[in-house]
Image (tube, grey):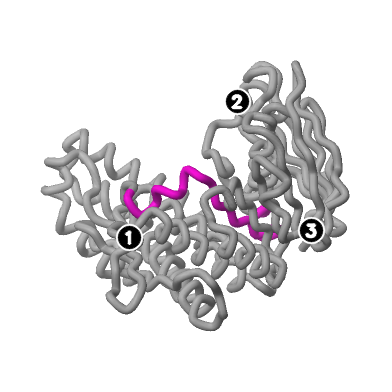
Amino acid sequence: MTLTRLHLTQFRSWARLDLQADRRPLAIFGPNGAGKTNILEAVSMLSPGRGMRGVPPGEQARRGPDVGWQIRAEIDDRQVLTRARPGQPREVMIDDKPGPQAALGRLLRVIWLTPAMDRLWTDTPEQRRRFLDRVTLSFAPGHAEDALGYDKAMRERNRLLRDGIRDPGWYRALESQMADMGAALTRNRLDAIARIMAAQDGAETAFPAARLTLLPGEGMADDPDPDSIAARLAGTRPRDMAAGRSLTGPHRADLGAHWGAQDMPAALSSTGEQKALLLSLILANARALDAESPVLLLDEVAAHLDAGRRAALYDEITALNAQAFLTGTGAELFDPLRGRAQFLAVSRGTDASHCTPDSG
């Protein structure tokens, strides 16, 4: 699938934007605050969830939550509309028919890397779990529905725990749902890790390969067996009741990463190597999705790379069967892409963002 046209109305700093794209990388450049990242965020909203910034729809409108916003896209021969009207949840339309957000994940596989993710290896397990789930979602669009179902059942179970309910009959159905969906989540995560590892091992790349593991933490979060999950939930009710929440399950999972001959933990690596490891995973994710032609969103990705690694990154991007959108403060950051990419200059006026195509 190829995103061939993107039309924004009242989204972030853009009053209007009509952007045409093709399979070449698109290098978007301009000063900080011009609106470059807002274009990438709009593309990320063509996938399930809250997009690459993870904020509610009301925070994405240019004129505030009382106005709303709209994104239209052409993906090959499919027409996609997603919008947020004032005070309403986000809507999705595909070929003029309403659909769930999960349908977007089956239409377009979107992968992103933002500067905030540079802290991934030293951040909280929750942030690494979200990263892993976004990777997993790119392979298994139904992963989002499993996660929503699991979270809903867990919230109901937590309510019973906080209310001090001891009757096991109240718990069995909820724990059965948590076990089935939790096992599916774990199987999806393990499969995604295996596919990323295989894509790293089979590639010639300038970026270090990481050995990835699904860490169980304190919650046995690497268990793919629904029967053992259900039995453990039943056995931990007294402890969970004392805590007022469910202490075991896939919601406690963490992503581990080691690299190099010394099997160095990513968290103990230098800042530069942590960034390189993250880039390696994103590129492997795109390679593993070769048949689905993913969309790759790289925000300010070149800013902290030396000239050699920057050129190597661009070579790898152009070799992928992926559509790439990149941002940077200056056109010179993308000089190695001259002749093989589209260029777009972005500026900020007194009221809104503006863009001018560059010859590239």
Task: Give coordinates of residue 229: x percent, y percent.
Answer: 27, 64
Residue type at numbered disc 1: Ser
Dot in front, 1 or 2: 1
Identify the mark at residue 338; answer none if there is no mark: 3
Nearer to the camera, 178 or 64? 64
Tell me which secondary structure the magenta stretch mostly adopts: helix
Residue type at numbered disc 3: Arg
Nearer to the camera, 338 or 5? 338
- Residue 223: name its quadrant: bottom left
Q: Which residue is mark 1?
A: 269
Whole-number angstrom distance, CA of label 3 to CA of label 1: 33 Å
Q: Secondary structure at mark 3?
A: loop
Residue beneath the point at 78% across and 54% down: 3
Callout 1 crowding tier (Cα within 10 Å): few <14, some 14–19, many ≥20: some
Q: Which residues are magenta?
A: 103-122
Whole-number angstrom distance, CA of label 1 to CA of label 2: 38 Å
Residue beneath the point at 16% across and 36% down: 164
How many tags in the picture?
Answer: 3
Q: Is residue 250 left or right of residue 239?
A: right
Q: Which residue is mark 2?
A: 58
Whole-number angstrom distance, CA of label 3 to CA of label 2: 38 Å
Is 197 drawn above or below residue 39 in the view shown? below
